[in-house]
Image (tube, rainbow, N blue to C red):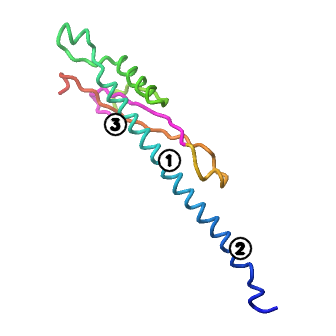
Amino acid sequence: MTGADRDRGRVSLFLAIALFAVLAIIGLSADAAGRLRTQQRADNLAAEAARAGGQEIDIELAMSQGLKVVDMGAAATAAVDYLRRAGVTGNATWITQGAGCADTARCLRVDVQMTYQMVMLPVFGFPETVTVNGSATAELLTDEDI
């Protein structure tokens, strides 16, 4: 048996292993980018919902006395409705201080939960879906706050 005969097949095995590793890296890159896009979308939807909630003022008070006061119940409802129309689940809560809100401010915090469907990595034993959370806080200002 010559030296060339002994090496036959070794290159094929190396290429098979290398191809598997390259496919895993491509899958990781593709799914990581997809998860990152989903994270960005969740954060963007949370910010948009918080802004939508911040536009809810007490109409009755504005009409009768000219005061622009945020209707806190309507603001939270408007934020959740915005998320529902966008096709995602989430909630809106009021915070009065801390967590990105000034001590004297009223802030609406919106949290969004989305699911990313993995494309390549389930082939390598990873889960098929990943849950992604996004959030945003809007500080609500009225005429008297400015």
Please state, as top left, top right, bottom left or bottom right, where the C terminus lies in the image: top left
> For the point 48% across and 38% down, which residue is it?
133
Q: Which residue lies furthest to the right in this view?
A: 1
Numbered tag placed on residue 100 in the rendering: 3
Earlier in the chain: of badge 3 and badge 2, it is 2
Q: Residue furthest top?
A: 64
Task: Tell me the SS state at disc 3.
Answer: loop
Name the amino acid type tagged 1.
Arg
Name the amino acid type tagged 2.
Leu
Q: Position of residue 114 (x, y in %)?
A: 50, 37
Q: Name the residue under label 2.
A: 13
Q: How far apart are marks 3 and 2 (CA)?
A: 55 Å
Task: Tell me the SS state at disc 2.
Answer: helix
Q: Name the residue under label 1.
A: 35
Name the amino acid type tagged 3.
Gly
Q: In this view, does 37 lie to the left or right of 54?
A: right
Please state, as top left, top right, bottom left or bottom right, where the N terminus lies in the image: bottom right
Q: What segment is highlighted magenta in the picture? A: 100-116
Task: Tell me the SS state at disc 1.
Answer: helix
Quadrant of the image occupied by residue 145: top left
Q: Position of residue 88 (x, y in %)?
A: 48, 31
Numbered tag placed on residue 53 in the rendering: none
Q: Position of residue 115 (x, y in %)?
A: 54, 39
Mark 2 and mark 1 residues within 8 Å of each other at the beta carbon: no
Does the magenta segment cover residue 104?
Answer: yes
Determine crowd level at label 1: few under 14, some 14-19, many 20+ residues with C-alpha closer than 10 A.
many
> For the point 25% across and 17% down, which residue is it?
69
